[in-house]
Image (cartoon, rainbow, N blue to C red):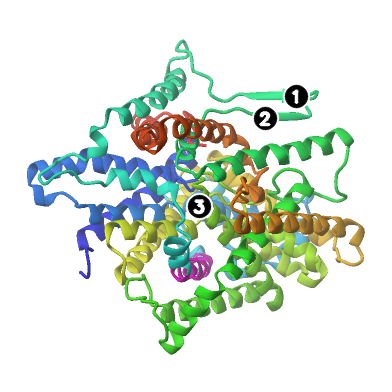
Amino acid sequence: MPGNFTYRSLVFGALMSLAINMFFAYARLAMATAGMSSDYITAGAVFLFFVLVAFINPLLKLAKYSWGFNRSELIVIYAMMIIGSAIPTWGFTGNLIAMLPNIYYYATPENNWSELLHPYVKEWMVPQDAEAIKYFFEGLPKGQRIPWEHWAVPLAAWISFILSIYLMMITIMSIIRRQWVDYDRLTFPLLQLPIDMTEEGKDGSIVSPFLKNPLMWIGFALPFFLFSTSALNHYFPFIPAVQLRNSISLFNNALNLATNVNFVALGLAYFLALDVGLSIWLFHLLTKAQITTENILGYSLVGRTDLFMEGSMSVSYQGMGAMLVLVLYGLWNSRGYLRQVWRKAFYNEGDLDDSQEILSYRTAIIVLGLSSVYATGWLTLSGVPFLISLFFLFIAFCIFYGLTRIVAEGGLGFARAQMTAQPFVIHSVGTEAIGPAGLVSLGMTFSWAGDLRTMIMASAINSMKLADVGQVRGRPMFWAIMLSIIVGLGGSVWMVVWMGYTYGAINLDWWFYNSFGAIIHGDTAYKIANPSHPWRDFAEVGPRFLYAGVGAGIMGMLMYARHHFLWWPVHYLGFPIGATLTITWSWFSIFVGWILKALIIKYGGVTLYRNFRPLFLGFILGHIFVSGFWVVFDYITGETGNRIPIF
């Protein structure tokens, strides 16, 4: 194959993507264990990759050195694995599958869904057969087969739609890659571990130098043994579990600060620029102070809190305003580069060379345009008015793009937005403009643009950055990404449906199989029963967008200061996500990692900082490996509910 690609690396990467989407989906949804495919840290990929690098590859090299995977092959495999990690559970399929039949199964005379929702459900979007829906939630009678024929049309419709969304994400990242990687020089802290793991020793070396470093093993051992006490306590209650999740309450419980010890967050913080690390924990404390002040004063915005808002309503809208400015200001600063991309794509002018990109700029723009047209058309056919479909996709992709920038630069293995696109769009135009069918469809978009803790866009840019290290950039990388997506989607869809019919969805993970859909459809029913209009309800809607404007203004000033004043000490990256649940649970560990790095650099300089790298990489790997180890152990023993949390 062209460049350093090999067919065996593509096959092995596809198999690993399939394993992540099937085994770790089963472990999370049926065994109630750790979410190994739930966040940007892509824990399942790290765990399996460590097994490959530390055990499988050395054994292959021992048998015959040429049988082992080289660095380029390992990077292709890992890139495919992190793409696959963004699909199951919180990525897409765990959210979507049970939500579809939920709209019929959980309809009752009390919630009145049969009148408020059912007339507006497009038949091609949701399974319609009552018996197929019943058996999905209650389990198939013995001897009956899964009624795939009733799932075929809705699954085909949704998979075609999500593929268009994924193509939009990938092409946007292929266009912006050079700006982020070569010009902005983002640090991509999430990639420090796999880069070190793939490092090759001297000729003939069987084991990676990373695995020979004693500091790494010290860092690895600490979380492994600490978290294993909790796992062993599950099996043997007389063994005490070390408590690593704590909190501090202040001001008569008006302020609660989580002080969790998360070794993944702590380790990643070591690889952040000091001003970025400062930004994350400082803005968390500042937004917490704002929420606490509101609670003490009894202040809150008028109206019903929307789904998946983080912090108070005012803080959520502030975060949305900040996120939009992060994206738009960033694109404005990249306007010169984007102009060059356009000239190269359609006039073949300029010095940009796109021969080593995963797609030529012309192809990327064309694919982006076609997939955008398909996604817009799909949403319009599902009931969302055309212009509102465009508006919704724009806001949703601003959130995706902003979060991807935060993950790439801030190295956050755990990140979410302060609020989602749906309430922002609905309150902007009103429910009457969208209509009942549009509201039902927008509710279902929470499967891919709602309670997101991971997504393909972030994995795509990380894969492209890794490709630089392994010298595997070029067109084959695009096909490796697409192969991983197709295999992952197929495996995870099959697994989630199979589990429902085999065990009965009401017996499986309650959030994914039951609560998620019920909450979303209930919220849609409420909006249909209580129509709104932005001008008629301005007393309720106006203050929300005022706070969005405040957040936008603050973010604009922070970004301006960052780009124009060398002495400015605080990065802007933490402001849009300051009060999110992911930061609430990880800020303390980020603070500890930040202060350790600051002290090491101050008193030992860059040399000592580099010497301590393996220790902090060991923290990350040890925490992930202990979770994965106990997932596999519990699967072998048939145990459930033994969760060693990554997050």
Mark 1 neighbour density, 10 Å: few (under 14) some (14–19) many (20 or more): few
The magenta segment:
154-175
Element at label 1: strand
Q: CA distance from mark 2 to mark 3?
A: 25 Å
Q: Residue at x 48, y 68 (%)?
A: 176
Residue 409's mark? 3
- Of all residues shown, which one is farthest toward the top? 238
- On the image, the x and y values in percent for residue 86 come to 46, 54
Q: Quadrant of the N terminus?
A: bottom left
Amino acid type shown at disc 2 = Leu
Q: CA distance from mark 2 to mark 1?
A: 8 Å
| Label 2 vs 1, first from the N-terminus | 1
Element at label 3: helix
Q: Answer yes or no: do the residues labelled 2 and 1 have beta carbons within 8 Å?
A: yes
371 or 162: which is nearer to us?
371
Mark 2 vs mark 3: give the one in front: 3
- On the image, the x and y values in percent for residue 402 come to 58, 58
